[in-house]
Amino acid sequence: MKTLLEYREKMKLFLGKYDIYLFPVLKFALALIAFLAINANVGFMSRLTNPGIALILALMCAFLPLNVTAVFGAGLILAHMYALSLEAFAITFVLFALMVLLFFRTAPKYGYLLIITPLAFGLRIPYVIPLAMGLMGTPVAAIPVACGTVVYFLLHYVRLNTAILGNTETSTMTEKITYLLDNAVNNKEMLLTAAAFALTLILVYVIRRMSVDHSWSIAIAAGTVTDIIVLLFGSLLLDVTPQILSVLLGSLISAGIAVLLQITVFSLDYSRTEYVQFEDDEYYYYVKAVPKITIAVPEKTVKKINPQRKISAVRKKEKQGRKTAEKQNRQNR
């Protein structure tokens, strides 16, 4: 615990000193990973799968607002969908247009969730997103989390059914659009996951805002259990094949990450809780004050020793010793 707190304080000092350089680097890394992941999963337009294009786009995103990365990613996906089929492009364009209208009117500051959520699905730990945003965000973050979930399932479905969607001989445009709407847009697993994440995020937010002791720990536990129950029982009710092992293992790993987040962001010492009462002309106040756990970072001091001075001091000492010895010899004579 003490070690983690020391690392937290060191990280704060490091970020405060070099944030002007670190944030562009982090935005560049996030954008590059996102664009390479898009090209790897739905790289239907071969000219855009060149890593150099992803590198150039990522360099541009490093110096632009984070929401621009989501816009560039959406444009890249649409280009690949157009190369696959006109029907896939049309459905994807309509979905993205609805997301833009819904997202930018409600939660524009959470644009990074449109990128991080699909990446978390790829890492098999998507359950950490509603837990983390419930601890650090607000309920409106449920909208970009749900949108990111829809993006992942859409791309995953298109990648698995490339042959059917790209076939221009056996299927008409109407049949392809109907097929996409029935299997990609009305995907029960996708809708269940989006609903479970939204419910978990809101529940975690409500609990961690309470004034009870250890509210963040209670919120993490309640959010993890809620997510598991909704996903597993919802799968049974909607007749969706439940992924029990994946849900349990991913939820436990996500809970562990959320606990680390709590330690580094919101560590309180409940043993020193104080209660304060005061009043003004209109109200009487009851205040509960819980101090944060703080730790001083040990400062390392380096003492520089000049070798020349050290040698001079030794020679001076030897010279004084010889003089003292000669003086004693003369006295003895």
Image (spheres, helix red, strand yellow):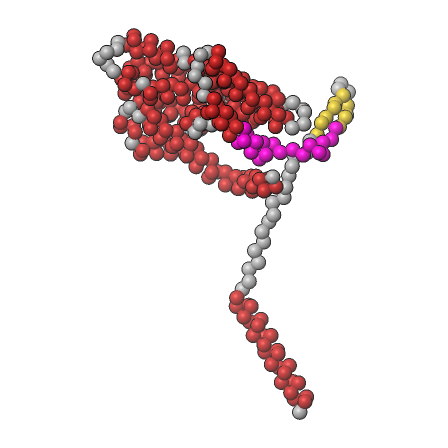
Depth check: 267 or 217 in front? 217
Measured along the vertical axis of the image, is residue 237 above or below residue 46?
A: above
Q: Position of residue 45 (x, y in %)?
A: 28, 24
Residue at 26%, 9% (x, y): give it: 172
Q: Position of residue 262 (x, y in %)?
A: 58, 31
Residue at 61%, 28% (x, y): give it: 217
> Which of the 4 quarters of the picture holds residue 120?
top left
Q: Is residue 105 visible?
A: no
Q: Is residue 18 visible?
A: yes
Q: What range of the chain is rendered magenta?
A: 255-275
Q: Is residue 295 left or right of residue 231?
A: right
Residue at 62%, 25% (x, y): give it: 218
Q: Is residue 262 magenta?
A: yes
Magenta: main secondary structure equals helix
Q: Position of residue 324 (x, y in %)?
A: 64, 81
Depth check: 224 or 306 in front? 224
Q: Is residue 67 left or right of residue 174?
A: right
Depth check: 117 or 280 in front? 117
Q: Is residue 250 left or right of residue 269?
A: left
Q: Quadrant of the C terminus?
A: bottom right
Residue at 65%, 22% (x, y): give it: 210
Q: Quadrant of the N terminus?
A: top right
Total tally of numbered discs in the picture:
0
Q: Position of residue 252 (x, y in %)?
A: 52, 28
Q: Please identify the residue farthest to the left as the structure is shown.
A: 169
Q: Is residue 270 left or right of residue 164?
A: right
Q: Please identify the residue farthest to the bottom as the structure is shown.
A: 333
